[in-house]
Image (tube, helix red, strand yellow):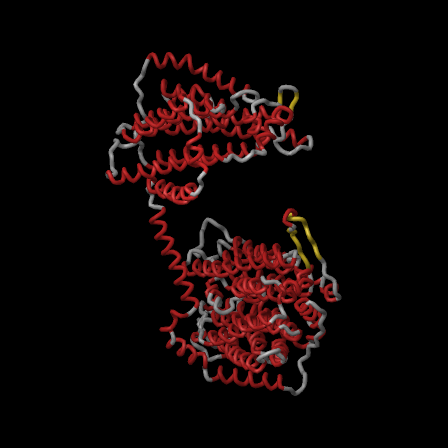
Amino acid sequence: MSADPHHAAPPARAGWLLALLPLAAFAGFATQIAPVVAGATPRLALAWVPSLDVAFSLQLDGLSLLFALLISGIGTLITIYAGGYLSGHPQLGRFYALLLLFTVAMVGLVCAGDVITLFVFWELTSISSYLLIGFDHERAAARAAALQALLVTGGGGLALLAGLLLLRQVAGGGELWRLSEQAAAIHASALYLPILLLVLAGACTKSAQVPFHFWLPGAMEAPAPVSAYLHSATMVTAGVYLLARLQPALGGSPAWHYLVSLAGAATMVTGAVLALAQRDLKRLLAYSTVSALGTLVLLLGLGTALAAQAAMLFLVVHSLYKGALFMVAGAVDHETGRRDVTALGGLRRAMPWLAAAALAAGLSMAGLPPLLGFISKELLYEAKLQAPAAAAWITAAGVLANVLTVAVAGAVAVRPFWGAARGAPPGAHEPPLALLLGPLVLAALGLVIGAAPDALLAPLIAAAAGAVRGEPTTIALALWHGLNPVLALSAVTIAAGVALHAVDARRRAEQVATGLRSWAWLTPGRAYQRAVSGLLAVAGMQTRVLQSGSLSAYVLIVFATLLATVGTAVLWHPIWWRRLMLAPVNLPEVAVCLMMIAAALAATRTTSRLAAIAALGAVGYGIALLFVFFGAPDLALTQFAIETLTVILFLLVIYRLPPFSLLSSPAVHRRDALLAGGVGALMAALVLVASASPLPSRLAPYFAAQSVPGGHGGNVVNVILVDFRALDTLGESVVLAVAAIGVWSLMRLRRDAAPMAPAPAFPPSLLFRIATRYVFPLLLLFSIFLLLRGHDAPGGGFVGGLTAAAAFALYLLAFGTAAARQRLRVAPQALIGGGLLLAGLSGLPAMAVGQPYLTGLWAGALGTPLLFDGGVYLVVVGVVLLMLFSLAED
């Protein structure tokens, strides 16, 4: 990412200071080692969604504690390392924020005590890792890698959510510590296999199991601190943690054993084979991480106590050496600008301390004594030899993977520092302490713990394995267990791995991989690319069809869909036919309907926009008359006001349009007429269906009975709007305000971008102006009258505001926009803001006396609903005038 001179980078010591946060967490978790090892399990549960019995739950047992110590401990070193690696970067502050967010998400994930809490943190790790992988977002490769990681792990996350919800339903609750108690019921359920498959989908995508392994090497586009953190003890091990956590509830079945073991074994071998063919340091380590994750999953699939112990010990070993080696690779790249192992060699003279850290971590990765990796490899072989089924095949696969891992360890940790010098840059030197501390500490821990594993690590490993098994376990760790088959396998592994490294098997593997590139289209990575490309192609095709930019096409699609779906259902409903024959009709209603039909036909046939607007207005006024006929005076008043203002708005708009012309063919006219007639007939049929079998209303009698005693008003409609459902009305007022401000903003942008057509110059009329001078104040008084009487009679703030806005619209047409603005004296935006403020504040008195927000309080004839209605009045006036003034001004 290019530096921005306008943004100063955080000081170099910021990493050391921020590292105190994960260090404090590490210290806090360390204080819990003794009680957790002794059997204590601290828990915290806070009510979250009580109606769904969902709590925000945390717990700390041996498994959670082991992961939390690795996450916070390595996170401390990574934070310091990031300060040195990205020193001077203008976006270092953003990186720190994302890194700490990711740390919190991972700690929350492993300490979650409920499946819903676990899933929330699970998704938070996906989002934060997406932002970290794509940190250098100016590079297309970084953006693509971040998106790939998000899509793969996000897809698995959706599957996991379904599995966890089913598991919660079958178990009768979501507390993780109780799931093992319901293991028998879960296994007996018909949903067991779907639950297992969905959970495995989430775990395998997160922990990069075959065939989802391809996203993990791609994530190497992230900065080195991210790669080191994600690949050592955090995101990629989240799937392993999930399987370990759910093993007491889901494990023990043949399906668990075969599915989990097969996925792990395939990934273990595939990752090791692919790693050997790489030449980039980070990709070498990334594919070896895939192999290590497969080993962990394989062990959890075996389901034995020894396998659980081996998995927990290997988790620690892998976190230590892989974190160290990734930081070594980043330091080498930082100081030399190279990551190609074929171009590196002899760096031990320029970087002796870094070389020592790399050697110690590499030896632990290879499983040589006296490092902790040797003890872990011995336990791994012992667990595989005692596998419940196919022990020989599992052990053979493990030996093959470990042999390749030894060769990879040599390529990563030995060749760049002790190999033949390959023209290292003359400026290569020892990296600063911030880049050295992490590798040295992690490598040293592998050596120190390996010297006394039983005292330093065994109790914690036993507690973690006990949580995985759901029962207490004991473990004894030592460097020497005598001469046995496990030791022989270790010797064969080391000898074969060293031989592969000596004969430069990496180069031969690279040649084989090059020869197989013609088959690359079969790989999961290419399948992902084809899936994404296909998805984008389909999206583009449907966008061209459904988002053509033509308003008439949108209307056509919506109405055709409505007619095809709802119309089919109506045709199968026979009641409306009988209703049509028996429905009584009155002459005034028939006359109004005929007038509306004639006006609608005129609107479609005229070539004058003014005539079309007038005809549409006649339709609207006809609807208002029907409201009057059927006893809805409030709706009629509102409809009259809206139709009047709509005609004016249309008038202001059409003067800016080009001359009217018929662009559609006669065939299109017939199609549109047929569709319009069908939709009209459908709406009539729906009304007849609804009136043929009306459902009894439970709300109408309640509101009618409570209008006066509960809302102190005889106008039920207004009482509902400003008292019973005032919060809804407040939300609708906010929507109106946002829409008006949107229109105003668009008009300003349009006016700034290009000159607009002149505003309509209405011919001055002396009679019109004289009439307006008298009608204007009368309309304003009438609007206040409607506002004040609306609680007991037809009226209210909404229709009152429309009437006041109509008065100003009349004034605008008579004297112009400037005169109307001067007459208003305040900006429409101020009316909108003041109205929203008044409506919002009217609900506070109720809260002051312990009532819910916006509950009506009354003192005689005065009450807070009147203030609320006044706020609605101001908002409506401001909204209408803001749009009118925006459209009328040049």
Is 466 displayed left or right of 558 in the figure? right
| Vertical position of residue 406 compared to residue 886: above or below | below
- Along the line of sight, which residue is nearer the eye, 668 or 781? 668
- Along the line of sight, which residue is nearer the eye, 296 or 613? 613
Where does residue 496 sit, x and y in percent of width and height? 52, 84
Query: In what quadrant of the picture does the N terminus appear?
Result: bottom left
Q: Is residue 156 visible?
A: yes
- Along the line of sight, which residue is nearer the eye, 251 or 410? 251
Where does residue 175 sit, x and y in percent of width and height? 66, 57
Query: In what quadrant of the picture does the C terminus appear?
Result: top left
Residue at the (37%, 29%) spot, across then down: 887
User: How many labels sit on residues?
Assistant: 0
Where does residue 430 sit, x and y in percent of width and height? 53, 69
Where does residue 734 sit, x and y in percent of width and height? 51, 34
- Along the line of sight, which residue is nearer the eye, 319 or 41? 41
Q: Residue 810: which quarter of the image?
A: top left
Residue at the (42%, 63%) spot, across then down: 528
Is 786 displayed left or right of 539 in the figure? right
Q: Residue 386: which quarter of the image?
A: bottom right
| Vertical position of residue 566 compared to residue 856: above or below | below
Q: Is residue 113 visible?
A: no
Considering every residue shown, the one lying at the far bottom of the view is: 483
